Amino acid sequence: MKKYHEVKDLSFTETTMKITIDGKKHEFDLNKLSPRLKSSTHSDRHNYEISPSGYGIHWPTIDEDLSIDGLLKIIHRPPRRRKSLTYK
């Protein structure tokens, strides 16, 4: 299985989510990040699963999912297609 990101040290304050992704610490404002997480209980916030590939985080009791690429604003674009050469 491909490992997309190394995710650890997920914690919360009243208004922020703090997380370490690929060795770098990040802090996200819950008001902008997720209304479900913002309004959830302490218990619900701490009941999460990080995908084995490091691709995302799931909170089963509030049915919320966040992708790590989305948090980091990484956009994946399909590779450009090369024009094939036709020989005559």
Image: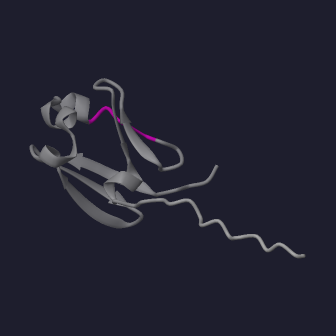
Q: Residue at x 30, y 49 (%)?
A: 10
Q: Seen in the image, is 77 located left or right of residue 29?
A: right
- Residue furthest to the front: 88
Would you place residue 48 above or below residue 74 in this image?
above
Residue 82: image quadrant is bottom right
Q: Residue at x 90, y 76 (%)?
A: 88
Q: How is the image coloured?
A: one colour
Tell me where residue 87 appears, x and y as whole percent: 88, 76
Would you place residue 67 above or below residue 83 in this image?
above
Tell me where residue 30 appears, x and y as whole percent: 16, 45
- Residue furthest to the right: 88
Magenta-colored stretch includes residue 48: yes
Q: Main secondary structure of the magenta part?
A: loop
Tell me where residue 17 appears, x and y as whole percent: 21, 49
Q: Residue at x 56, y 59 (%)?
A: 78
Task: Write down the region rendered in magenta.
Answer: 46-50
Q: Residue at x 31, y 23 (%)?
A: 61
Tell me where residue 31 appears, x and y as whole percent: 12, 45
